[in-house]
Image (cartoon, rainbow, N blue to C red):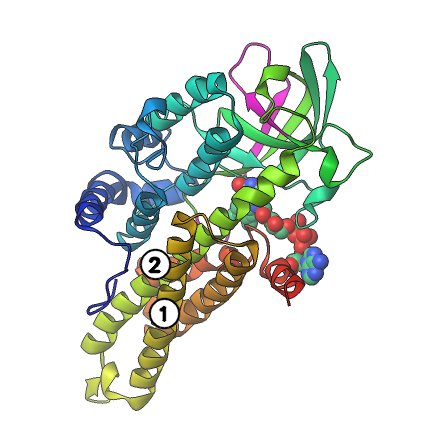
Amino acid sequence: MFKGYKSPWMTEELQIFEEHVGKFFKQAFVPHAERWNKQGMADRDAWNIAGENGLLCASIPEQYGGAGGSYLHETVIADQEIKTGAASFGIGVHCLVAHYILSYGSEEQKMRWLPKMATGELVTAICMTEPGTGSDLQAVRTTAVRDGDHYVLNGSKTFITNGQHANLLCVVTKTDPDERARGISLLMVETEDEGSKGVTRGRNLEKLGLHSHDTSELFFEDVRVPVENLLGDNEGMGFFQLMDQLPWERLYIALAAVSAMEYALDITLKYVKERKAFGKTLMGFQNTRFKMAEAKTETTIARVFVDQLLLELMRGELTVERAAMAKWWTTQKQCEIADECLQLHGGYGYMMEYPIARIFADSRVQKIYGGSNEIMKELVARFL
Ligand SMILES: Cc1cc2nc3c(=O)[nH]c(=O)nc-3n(C[C@H](O)[C@H](O)[C@H](O)COP(=O)(O)OP(=O)(O)OC[C@H]3O[C@@H](n4cnc5c(N)ncnc54)[C@H](O)[C@@H]3O)c2cc1C
């Protein structure tokens, strides 16, 4: 957060939590960053360590093993993950799946999965995208056909965050392939369940950024999933459940974008005040001051907007339209600011040992996942 600006939702309790989380990332994750980035994923036990420290399911009620916090706690975790320069994994995705279970799961499902998700014993993934369809979610082809007290699952997914480590998958399936939205159901698949044979993981995909996040293809071949693993009371509710939860996912991406902009600005300001050229610091050039002034202005505008939406989310008033606005605009600005800040680092900005290089590389995907920015504009346009 900038000097002189305090988010309206920030409390003393959250500030203490922020210190705890920041210290945790610095001590437990940052020292492993280089190795995790090189190996293309965090160590599996990092999940358990994060769980022990209350970082998984922070916004899930204590009765289900969570920390009993709110979306504000998740926001603080995402912010500190970025600003400490920690290499990490899909904590946000894990939180998202927890909220699907909390919102649509039966009492039995909540008790079965959430406590283990909070400790890191269960690692989750959300499996929407398929090789043949991403943006057009209603066109998914993975099928779940009822056979007695099981569904038989067939299909494949790609680009799945936590895809190597996940042992509980929230799979977007078609229980009625003749329908589009109304044919979609969410099915929870436990990969270590004896019955769940037929789940295969593809390789860990090599990416432009987010190197410590494991991202994979997943294949389902005649996987028998108990009918009690359906999320919600009836088949065909999946698309509506997704539409209900996606505003939080998109705001989460926007919040991460703003944290990355603030971090980029912070490290770049330090750099340009120290680095000298032509006998003066880089900050001594008007071009540098103007670039920094523009970046700070845009970052502040972005921060004020996402803070406002966070308050709307807490009141249960966040709309699809406003979450879409925040997602496309902040991630666009994130990429622009990361690029300008890298430029001010000169050649050092291109070296991975400088944090700005990683911020730049990690930024690019933000315009793509969670619904591409073009799809976000389509959503905003629908309300014009
Ligand atoms: C690192 C990473 C992690 C991811 N994690 C997950 C995950 O955990 N779970 C998951 O399910 N998915 C995940 N995804 C997938 C991501 O959500 C999709 O890549 C994204 O939704 C876009 O789908 P697509 O790649 O099929 O592109 P396409 O849908 O083929 O789109 C290609 C281009 O066409 C544009 N386009 C498509 N339709 C329209 C339209 N109607 N109007 C205008 N332009 C359009 C898009 O904006 C895009 O620019 C991840 C992706 C990445 C890269």
Quarter occupied by residue 187: top right
The amino acid type found where label 1 is placed reads Thr
Going by the picture, which residue comes out furthest to the right? 178
Q: Is residue 19 above or below residue 293?
A: above
The amino acid type found where label 2 is placed reads Ser
x and y percent of residue 200 in the render?
60, 25
Q: Is residue 363 above or below residue 87?
A: below
User: Would residue 192 be counted in the magenta stretch?
Assistant: yes
Q: Residues within 10 Å of mark 2 (few under 14, many from 20)?
A: many
Q: Is residue 103 left or right of residue 201?
A: left
Quarter occupied by residue 295: bottom left
Quarter occupied by residue 350: bottom left
Mark 2 vs ligand 1: CB below 8 Å: no
User: Would residue 234 be counted in the magenta stretch?
Assistant: no
x and y percent of residue 246 in the render?
54, 46
- Residue at image point 59% right, 27% down: 232
- Residue at image point 36% right, 66% down: 304
SS at mark 2? helix
Label for residue 259? 2
Q: Which residues are magenta?
A: 186-210
Quadrant of the drawing holding the N terminus? bottom left
Residue 113 visible in rendering? yes
SS at mark 1? helix
Q: CA distance from mark 2 to mark 1?
A: 9 Å
Residue 290 versus residue 148: which sits nearer the camera? 148
Q: Is residue 364 above or below residue 239?
A: below
x and y percent of residue 268 in the render?
28, 70
- Residue at image point 37% right, 22% down: 115
x and y percent of residue 92 in the render?
42, 42
In the picture of the structure, the residue carrying the numbered disc 1 is 299
